Image (tube, rainbow, N blue to C red):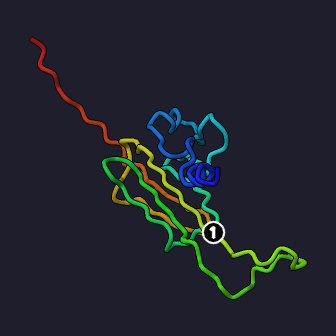
Amino acid sequence: MMDTMESLMEQPPAASSVSPYQWGPQGDTTSSYSRGRTPWEIKESENGYKIRFDMPGMTREDVKVWVEEKMLVLKAEKAEKDDKSGNGNVEGGDEGEWSPKSYGKYSFRIALPENIQFENIKAEVKDGVLYVTIPKAPVTSKILDINVQ
């Protein structure tokens, strides 16, 4: 059972991959899965998109973000710390010592829309929350003359 629980925590089924239709229609300011709560939220503005990922306990050093084939890829992992200092005593002392645990793993792949500036994406971690800013590309209209025959 512990293996099952650990695999669910490592890769929640509702948050492992997001396809483009989940960005919502134009003008929709937030997007989320319809199945349960996801640890992220997308907001759209005139200038771009902002995504907030809840990653409790994660620091900048634990998080990697990159773009691969028009997909925003996020991975974060906090390794278990082995603390033998004995500070994990159970209150009352009847059950011995608990070893302190600090472990988490996140993995997301989000399909990006076409109208963004891939090279200007920014990411920042603050207090266990990852903020990703994705600027929209300027709208250019192109006029093509079509020869009528």
Which residue is at 62% across, 46% downward?
38
Of residue 132 and residue 79, the one placed in the foreground of this image is 79
Residue 40 seen: no
Residue 146 vs 108, above or below: the answer is above
Q: Amino acid under label 1?
A: Gly
Residue 119 at x, y percent in the picture: 33, 59
Residue 75 seen: yes
Which residue is at 50% across, 70% downward?
62
Of residue 113 and residue 77, the one placed in the foreground of this image is 77
Residue 23 at x, y percent in the picture: 50, 39
Give the residue furthest to the right.
Answer: 92
Residue 141 vs 56, above or below: the answer is above
Of residue 138 and residue 7, the one placed in the foreground of this image is 7
Give the residue furthest to the bottom.
Answer: 85
Quadrant location of the C terminus in the rendered image: top left
Which residue is at 56% across, 51% downward?
7
Tag 1, which secondary structure? loop
Q: In this view, does 107 lie to the left or right of 87?
A: left
Which residue is at 60% across, 79% downward?
82
Q: Quadrant of residue 37?
A: top right
Read off the residue under disc 1: 57
Q: Is residue 149 left or right of residue 52?
A: left
For the image shown, how many numbered marks are present on the structure?
Answer: 1
Residue 73 at x, y percent in the picture: 42, 54
Residue 70 at x, y percent in the picture: 34, 47
Give the residue furthest to the left.
Answer: 149
Tell me if mark 1 has few (under 14), some (14-19) or many (20+) residues whose alpha carbon lies within 10 angstroms of its own.
some
